[in-house]
Amino acid sequence: MDLILWRHAEAEEGGEREKSGPSREDPDLSRPLTKRGQKQAKHLGDWLRPRLPPDLHILVSPALRTRQTADALGLPYETSRRLAPDARVADLLAAARWPDASQAVLLVGHQPTLGRLAALLLSGQEANWTIKKGALWWFSNRVRAGETQTVLRTVLAPDFII
């Protein structure tokens, strides 16, 4: 199984998170990408699109900035509350069905959860690792000699392809 983590590109700054009632949207979810973020998403999407496996399932946080990042791929995706800014690593793993899904999965989400997930996949424990805005980390899971292994295939930051 392949699991690709893509942090949303640069977004407009948000103020302090406001407490909102159940009928009002969290203002953090409405922050759009900046012009630079749009450029980051487009360039990384252009790099990623021809390399994606054909059986890919794309899951995206409901936040506007993640949806705009995913839009740069020009491929259909599913929005999932499990990837929201307040998500836990366990939420992302469940959404992706890692490592047992029958297809590759691309998660477009947020810090600190994506960084914590990357740390868990590579070191076996959650840690506060940082994934740069607009960057992606691509993992594969395989079994060799009866042992399950996680392989880091690539890490790419948008400033290396812009």
Image (spheres, rainbow, N blue to C red):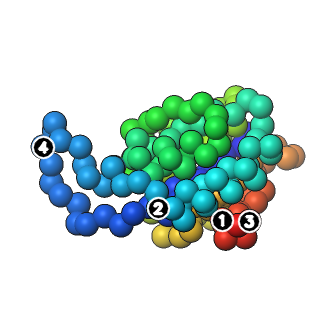
Q: Which mark is residue 161?
A: 3
Determine which residue is flagged by label 2: 34
Residue 89 shows in this picture: no
Q: Amino acid at mark 3?
A: Ile
Give the alpha-carbon distance from disc 2 to disc 1, as whole Å: 14 Å
Give the alpha-carbon distance from disc 1 to disc 3, as whole Å: 6 Å
Residue 35 shows in this picture: yes
Q: Which mark is residue 21?
A: 4
Graded by Cα atoms within 10 Å as few (under 14), some (14 to 19) or many (20 or more), the crowding at tag 4 reads few
CB-based contact (under 8 Å), mark 2 and mark 3: no
Q: Secondary structure at mark 4?
A: loop
- Please report whichever mark, 1 or 4, sits nearer to the chain's N-terminal start: 4
- Please report whichever mark, 4 or 3, sits nearer to the chain's N-terminal start: 4
Left/right placement of residue 137 relative to residue 7 reads right
Left/right placement of residue 25 relative to residue 41 reads left
Q: Secondary structure at mark 1?
A: helix
Determine which residue is flagged by label 1: 158
Graded by Cα atoms within 10 Å as few (under 14), some (14 to 19) or many (20 or more), the crowding at tag 2 reads some
- Please report whichever mark, 2 or 1, sits nearer to the chain's N-terminal start: 2
